[in-house]
Image (cartoon, rainbow, N blue to C red):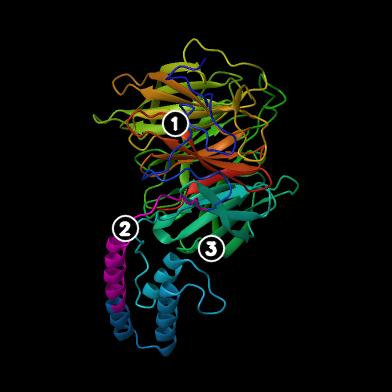
Amino acid sequence: MWSAHDSAVGPGVKYGELPSLSGVPRKNIGGKKNKKIMTGRRSSVLSGPKSTAPAASYVGFGLLFLTTLILLLLLLTDLVSNRFRCCRAWIQLIRPGLLPNTVSQPDIMFKDLLSTAGVTALVLPGQTAATLLYATTYLDTITTLSLKGSSLQAIASTPGCGANSSWLTPDYANNRIFCLDEGLTSPNGTLSSFGLTSNGTLSQLDIVDTLSGPVSGVIYGESSNGLALAHYSGSSVAAFDISDASTLAPVQAETYTLSGPGPNPDRQDAPHPHEALLDPTGQYLLVPDLGADLIRLYSVDEGELSFTELEPLAVVPGSGPRHGAFLVTEDGTTYFYLASELANTITGFEVTYNDDATLDFTEVYLSSTHGLNETVPNNTTSAAEILVSPDNKFLLVSSRGEGTLKIPNFDPTNSTEIASDPIFTFEIDHSSGKLTRVQQFPAGGSFPRQFSINADGSLVAVGLQNDGRVVVIGRDVETGLLTDFVAAADVGGQPTSVIFAAE
């Protein structure tokens, strides 16, 4: 039995409906009828006869308003082609299907009408603006997904990142995104840059070779014009100047060796930097090295993109540090949380900034990914992603290779349940840095390699590597609990990363 704080999908969920935390089919915002997953079709509800008089008055008022609007727009635009588009959109609004080669979607036609005057951000009453996401897989594409209600659909597929696309680093302030290709069958990897548009399409700006195996990147520098990379198979940490995204230029590379294999010789035969992340001050780069059982530390040179290596932080031998996340509390205390893949542990450190520009780490917490006094189920389990919620109150970590949770199939025509790995949520005690587990929730399938949280903390997007699926999960911002599956989409290949577009 699942408790309220330890919940998977409960009984009573019909196949084809969105599973929910409580077992009650998920309701859409606004009390509208539930939509079936993966179809993107709109539901229609027939009700009994109603009086037409109020409706007629509303229609009359609406037509008067739109007529006034179309006249204003015709005055605002001076291009004949734009005036034609205005009139075409207007006719389509009042008489869907009257014109050839048009679609009967008034909301789209209304936006087209408005766009002639440069008005692009208006959403019709009752319509929900779509949320965009970007996903990579072990295919040569970046998939743009549109989330609207309970529908998650691919709207664009952009080639050019590489056959083993492994990571996306956004730079939304400059309308661009950077993609890494791990190059599993090549002697090198690649770094690609893409320009972003509001409709989700991407345009490639540049692509350059890198050292082999880039798996993570982070933007750094006083002007945010550097990109530091962790190279898993290349045993390296490198950086590029991204000031001009159409001319990416190498800055620095540090390559490491081991005198001998680590306690886990199959996975620790060489240094394996697994993530590059920036501390909250922006002055230090941290790179968890799974193969060397180290957190490699670097200080960013003032006013430069170069960085200087500091004494690394040694962690438990054989633990295999993978990813980390920072938290700064209200009183200015800094904590660093580390997910170690091989030991399946979460370690919390209090970080001290010294006057000599070095860092000290004091351990304040240690548990398995399942929480204090909990064990992982088998030796195939491996910790994956770790993130702190936008409000700094909760920590989330995903675990792979468990498959112990069962959820209804996302395909409404398939009654076979899906095995799922978990995502764990912990509440953070800001005074001590300690964690308290509050929930285990199904990730939506197998091998949640990476996940992202949207800006307001209400949604979590998960890339399920073994299932070729991206799942979006609802989240209660106040309690920190994951609540229900909002939508899912098959993207093919093996999803390696998924991020939300700027909001």
What numbered label is drawn on residue 225?
Answer: none
Q: Is residue 24 visible?
A: yes
Residue tagged 2? 51
Q: Amino acid at mark 2?
A: Ser
Q: Is residue 254 visible?
A: no
Residue reaching furthest left? Answer: 331
**The magenta segment:** 42-67
Q: Circle 1 — which element?
A: strand
The residue at 56%/13% (across/down) is 375
Residue 221 rendering spot, x and y as whole percentages: 41, 50
Residue 254, located in which quarter of the rendered image? top right
- 127 relative to 347, above or below: below
- Give the crowd class for mark 1: few <14, some 14-19, many >=20 residues within 10 Å: many
Residue tagged 3? 201
**For residue 170, side relative to residue 330 (left or right):** right
**What separation in Å lies between label 2 and label 3 (alpha carbons)?**
45 Å
Mark toward the start of the polypeptide (2 vs 3):
2
Residue 296 rendering spot, x and y as whole percentages: 51, 33
**What separation in Å lies between label 1 and label 2 (alpha carbons)?**
42 Å
